[in-house]
Amino acid sequence: MANRGKPGDLDGRRRDLEAALAARRRERPSGGEGAERGGKSDFANALKLSSEFIAGVVVGVALGWFIDRMAGTSPWGLIIFLLLGFGAGILNVLRSAGLIAEFGSKAPKKGDDDL
Amino acid sequence: MATDPIHQFQISKWIPIEIGGLDFSFTNASAFMVATVAGAGAFLFLTTSSRGLVPGRLQSISEMAYEFIASMLRDAAGSHGMRFFPFVFSLFMFVLVANLLGMFPYFFTVTSHVIVTFALAILVIGTVLVYGFWKHGLGFLKLFVPDGVPGVLMPLVVAIEVVSFLSRPVSLSVRLFANMLAGHITLKVFAGFVTSLGAFGVAGAAGAVLPLAMTVALTGLEFLVAFLQAYVFAVLTCMYLNDALHPGH
Amino acid sequence: MEVEAAKAIGAGIACLGMGGAGIGLGHIFGNYLAGALRNPSAADGQFGRLIFGFAVTEALGIFSLLVALLLLFT
């Protein structure tokens, strides 16, 4: 952390290291690691997907409830933000399932979210 | 009592400190966080201090951890993301070592408290926000505006994207916390069955073999979950950092 | 009966609707999996429809959750 002030130097050193590593890595076959990671990431995905959807809905409800508390628009904030949170949850699931690319890119299935 | 499955999560003050009405006590949670940091740091430092060209067992564990996170970050965020390597590696090691420390009997599991995991998640999202705005300025807001959406739908889509972004720290923290909490409670409940069945004499002791076997199996599963949760946390951190580095594509 | 108690009971009854959504989701994913195992090559193409069915079904569950939340928090 102490030599954070000169990033150019660090970047240069890192690039050198990267090039050296890349040259060395090509010689080494990388068979076992990829297969191992495939099995692990299935389980990891299952853990991930279930909570992504719920988190969207929960955040929607919390936002709506908070806005209702602040602006006194009860119950409309809760209704609208719950539905928005539902859409966001589905978007989260689609995104982590890999159907939609990351934030900000062109989304082919966006029509599903506005029921 | 010892059979209460919630008892293991209680926070007790070891050294009460109070500054200006705020509670800064040194609790068992703080002690185990210090132990986590010290353990991870000492392990990495001691195992790599010999710097053998042919790594020994412990040194190759450290090198595997480094390689694992480095390749993950490089895949997710490109070589620009490598400037966040210390951050992601520290997070991964903290969560992993905290989870594994919690697997010792009578030890406190730091990550089973939602405030700890939420603080970690807020740290990640805060880094993404600060770095994104510092690097791209207001162009960072393009994150919320996807291409190719008709103008009528735009407010709706942007609102959904914003809620989706806000749900990230929640899902990141609640996933880790809920998995650790549920796993440890299940473990404790099944272990409690063993003692309560053992009180019923010989037949009870014979029946107690079943929950004991279940406890052993669950312990194995918990070690898997402890590693997987640290892995998922690190993967998602890499993905979110990628958003900060490259918004808009 | 107290109004608060009636609200809590109503919220509980409203949550029964989410059980129906759960049954529907089980049907959708189960049938998708059965179809995908019979004809794995066509499975990837139908993933979008799977998510669409999931969204529409889950929306009904979300509506009952909404009713429960409105009863509890307004």
Image: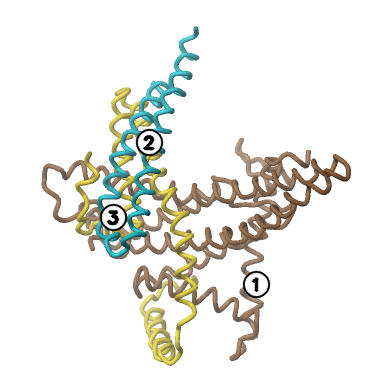
Chain colours: A yellow, B brown, C cyan
Q: Residue at x 37, y 72 (%)?
A: B75
> Distance from label 1 to label 3 (Cα)?
45 Å
Q: What is the secondary structure assignment of the residue under circle 2?
A: helix
Left or right: where does residue C33 sit relative to residue A47?
left
Q: Residue A80 location in percent, x, y?
A: 28, 32
The tag on residue B43 is 1
Q: In this rendering, is residue B114 above or below A75?
A: below
Q: Residue at x 22, y 59 (%)?
A: A105
User: Residue most toward the top?
Assistant: C1
Instruction: Pick whichever, B196 or A29, lies toward us.
Output: B196
Count residues near mark 3 (Cα–Cα under 10 Å), then give few for <14, some for 14-19, many for 20+: some
Count residues near mark 2 (Cα–Cα under 10 Å), then give few for <14, some for 14-19, many for 20+: many
Instruction: Pick whichever, C6 or B50, lies toward us.
Output: C6
Count residues near mark 1 (Cα–Cα under 10 Å), then give few for <14, some for 14-19, many for 20+: some
Left or right: where does residue C27 sit relative to residue B152?
right
Q: What is the secondary structure assignment of the residue under circle 1?
A: helix
User: Residue beneath label 3, please?
Assistant: C47
